Structure formats: structure tokens, C-alpha cells
Image (cartoon, rainbow, N blue to C red):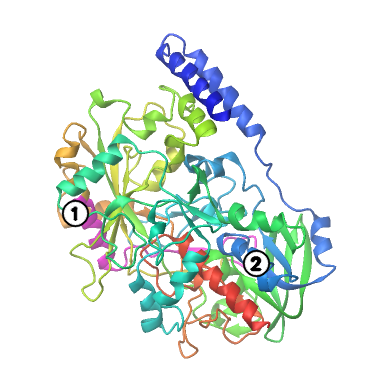
Amino acid sequence: MVQTTGALLMLVLALLAALFTAWLWIPIVLVVALVGFFLQHAQKSSVSTAADAADATRQQWDYIIVGGGTAGCLLANRLTSGNGAGKRVLVLEAGSGDYNHPMVKVPAGVLKLFQGEKDWNFTSVNETKTSGRGIYLCRGKVLGGSSALNVLLYTRGDQHDYDTWEAEYGCVGWGGKDVLPLFKRHEDDLTGCAKDTKHHSTGGEYAVEHVRYQNPLSKLFLQACKQAGLPSNGDFNNWSRSQEGAGRFPVSSRSGTRCHAANAFLEPALSDPTRKLKVLTGARVRKIIFDGTAAAGVQFSADEVTQIVRLAPGGEVLLTGGALHSPQVLMLSGIGPKEQLEQHGIEVIKSLPGVGENLQDHPAAVVSFECPKEKRGISVTSKIRIPHTTLPHPLPVLQWLFQKTGPLCSTGCDHGGFFRTSAAAKDSPSPDLQMRFLAARAVTADGMGSFTKFKNITDHPDGFSFQSIAVRPKSRGRVMLASADPNVKPVVETRYLTQKEDFATIREGIRLGRKLAQQPAFKDYVGPEVFPGAHVQTDKELDAYISDSAHTANALVGTCRMGPSQDPLAVVDPDMRVMGTTGLRVCDSSIMPQLPGGQGASCTLMIAERAADLVLSSCT
């Protein structure tokens, strides 16, 4: 019945569209009505009250999870079921509980999420290789964390990434053969790759599918790759073959709706009345409370009231704040570089110089082309807007509402590939470049700027872009305290491009994008090169452009690095226990010793699965 109604509505809309130029007010009124109805059904932004927080202080907890993001949501589920049944678990999340907001559920809603109220909206400082620019870094400020704000891509890296963790960084038990079952545990593969049971599974909580929409330009991209002699890859998560090749990226969505950690793991756990699980939102952690070097509880503030929650005997604090907040919480609690703690007047519980070091991310730059005017309407940016306005076009809205298809199912970058350039490490079989194809002309040279500024642009020209990402970067940054006040954001230095290899990878990616744009597939669609411009050709010119426009591909990791006890910069051991303490683990993306050549969410969920196993096995 719903599908029939949807089809009828779209038929009516098509008739309206035919009269569009004469009857502009009709689709505008329809869009406003539809969007208004949609937003009325949104979950209201919610944070816990002081009374909610006080109630949590009246009992002791087996596990206190600090951070309700990607890892924290999965941990809350696993620690209250199976072997965790009966355990009392408290989740403290500084952001809101508004994870079912329409702009979260609709994949294309990411255009409204970046730099909005659900984004911590960090900007890096002290950058020496980005023309003095700070780098905008999106981090989720809502239950589900950055899995609720990312561009949905679900790629794990390759087996060599994890074998390197074990062989080179001493992380025993984290090799490829060890982590693959953890990836599969929560997977519900809907791409058709599940017939490969070695690498995929079905029936898990976390859905992975191909976007239920393909822009014509995205199809041309795949043709151009073939014409350029590049291999194809139908499954980027198949470790039996090279990661190299072009194809459709798998995405974390179910029937065209974003799948993230809160709706996949936390919501079902909260809906189960037998579980002893409590979640506080708007709960900003001030510090971990210690009895000597043993974690005893957590101090936090909610609704402007400071509270302390305490562990039950044998309990643990599990830190899952992510690569920027986890080191901040450790340092506020007295664990980190001694000199830095003393500078801010913080009592040193354990001096660990590696806290905040080893920050890694995916730096990127774009090459973008405009389409000839006669191809007006081909780009996704034209398909989702009423011409001459910033209003959403009603047809894709109806397609998503009633059929969960159409361009709103896409964040825009779900086609691309992984490639080895001349800058790739000779001692590694892995690609150094990830390319994402976007069926849209860039708004600015800074790719993240295109996402954040498009919402205010009318009559944007049609075109297409290639985003080149140093997917296995060599540069390392750091996170430092700006203040002993937990309400003050930490200082973030990405140190993008401080290693020449990252410049070289992105530079060669730009050249590859240019080569693809000149293939026969794009012959009728390629117009002038907008960014960086055809006049930018030499290595020096390209490097200057990269410095001026480099931006994040959102994969921040590594600031609480995992390693053996003899590693002076390791923060946690291979069981994720913070060195020199008891009852405290870090269980998120910050423990990665080296960034895998994939997207952060998939790897973070794998880490949380491992954390749940280790935590529950230690209490039996």
C-alpha cells in the first residue's frame, strides 16, 4: 500500500515538474509541506537532566563506558547480553540523544550535519604544510558518534594492515586472521558478497549494502577506469585478492537509511527491559577517579551539576571517546606526558608520554571539472535541488520517503577505488591512494568546504570530481591539552603533509584523476578543469595547490597507541589496558598503532568487539 501511494505521488510530482517553470510555487509548497511533516516526526534533541544523573550515582556499576560513539554503542550492547547478562552498564555521552534525526537517517543529510549541532567541529592549529590553514575535523556529538555523521563508506583495509600491527608494533592477537572474525560478527552484508563466507556474513546488526542509486556520471567513471587500463574490484573487503581496483564502495546503510552504531547496537539494547543499561546524554566527563592507580569511578557534569559515579568491585572504566577526546580525558585524569600535566596543574597519576601522540588521518585533495552547459542537470547536485533555490527537489524527497531510493540515498562519494602510485611503499603490497569519485563539481578546492558550503549555494554548475586520499599516510600529528577545563577543546595538530610521501601520493592521484577525465567515457561531459586548473602542472605547482586545499577524509586514529609494555610510546597493551593502571581500558580508534587503508568506523567496531571479548573474559 505504501509503495503504491508513493508511486502515485511521484506520478503526480512528475506532472507538476513538467509545468515547473510556469508553476514554480506548486513544487515549492509541496517540498515545504513534505519536509515539515518529516521534521515533525524527528526525535527531539535530548540530553539527560540533573535528576537522571543523580539517579545514576545511587548504585555502583560493573562497567562505565565513557563515550557513546561508534565503539561505546557496540560495547553497551555486548556487555549487557550473552556472558554480560546481568552486568550493570552506564554510558556517559557528552552529545545529544538525537540519533534518529532525519538528517542522520537520510544519507544525503550529511550536507546539513557537518559543522552543525551534532558535530564537535574541531579545527587544527599550528599547521606548517597547509599554507597556515587550520583543518576542519568533523567528530560526532551525538549517540553513535562519528558513525552518525560520516559518509558511510565501509572498507576495512587489507590483511597486511593488521599483520603489520602484530609484526611491527607488537600487538599480539591483532593480525589479519585474528580480526577478520570480529569484522564478520556484526556484519549483515546485503551487497551480494556474502557468498564469500570467508570474508563476509549476514544476519548481524550492522548493515552493509551498495547505494540504491547510481548517477550516470558514476557509471561513466567505472567505464573510464576500464578504458585507462585500471583493474576493477567488486569487493574491497576480500582479503584473498589485492585491494587495488575501481568499483562501488560498500556503505553502512539498510534499505537506503543510514546504519550507525546507535540504531544498530544501542537502540536494541535499550529496548530490552531485561538489560541493566543506562545512558546519560549531555554528560561531559571531567575526569576518571582513581584510588591510587586503580580506576574507581568517573566525575562528570550534566545539566550544569557535577556528579560522581563509582565502579562496583572488579568493575572497569572503558574509555571510548575517540582519537581526540580519549587522550584529553586521560590527561585531565592525570595520565599522559608529565610535563604537559604539570603545566596545567594536574596531579600525575601515571606518566605516559605517548598519550596524544601518533595522531593519523587521511589527507585529501580534489581535481574537479565542469560539464558543458548542454549537460545541465546531470550532476547529483542538480537532481536534489529546485533550480534557482536552495530548496530540496520534491522528487528525490518522495523517492526516499516512499521507496528509499534515489540520490538522497547517497552521500555522493560511493564510487571510487584503491590504487598504487609511484609513491607507494616498495616494501608493502598495499595501495597508497584511495580515490573517491563524486558526480558533482566542487564548490571550493577544499573538499570539506564543498560539503559545508553547498547548502547555501544556488544554481551550482554541473560537473564531476576526483578526491585523492593518502590512504596509508606517513605524517603523524598530536593532541594536547589546551586547559585543565574539560569544557575547552584540546589542541589538535594534524601535521598533514609533513612527510613527502603523502604529498607524492596525492599529487599522483590528481594526475590520475586528470587522466580518467580524458577517457572516451567522459568525452561528451568534460569541460574546463575548475580545480586546480589546467595551468597547474609541475610537481611544485601541484604541491602548492595541495598545501592550499588539503582537507580531511575523516579517519582520525592513533592517539592512545597500542603496543607491548617495552614500547615507550604505547599507552595501552594488546588487551587495551592503560599502562600502569588497573580497571581502565581504552577501546576505540585511538588505540590503532597505524591507520589501516580503509574507513575508520568499520575498524572501530572491530576493536569494540575485541574489547567486549577481553572485558567479559577477564571477569569469569
**Mark 2 lies on residue:** 66
Which residue is at a point 66% across and 54% down the rendered structure image?
A: 267
Q: Nearer the viewer, residue 456 or 225?
A: 225
Assign a secondary structure to mark 2.
Answer: strand
| Residue 253 position (above or below residue 573) | above
- Say whether residue 138 is visible: no
Label 1 Cα crowd, 10 Å radius (few <14 / some 14-19 / many 20+): some
| Residue 495 position (above or below residue 264) | below
Would you say residue 487 sits in the magenta stretch? yes
Q: Residue furthest bottom?
A: 566
Which residue is at a point 42% across and 40% down the rendered structure image?
A: 212
Residue 419, image x and y in percent? 24, 59
**Mark 1 lies on residue:** 230
Which of the numbered marks, if any, corresponds to residue 175?
Answer: none
Which span is picked out in magenta? 483-512
Q: Residue furthest top?
A: 22
Residue 488, image x and y in percent? 61, 60
Name the kind of residue labelled 2 in the image.
Val
Q: Is residue 226 left or right of residue 48?
A: left
Q: Nearer the viewer, residue 37 or 85?
A: 85
Would you say residue 503 sits in the magenta stretch? yes
- Say whether residue 217 is visible: yes
Q: Is residue 47 left or right of residue 148?
A: right
On the image, which quarter does residue 308 sit in? bottom right
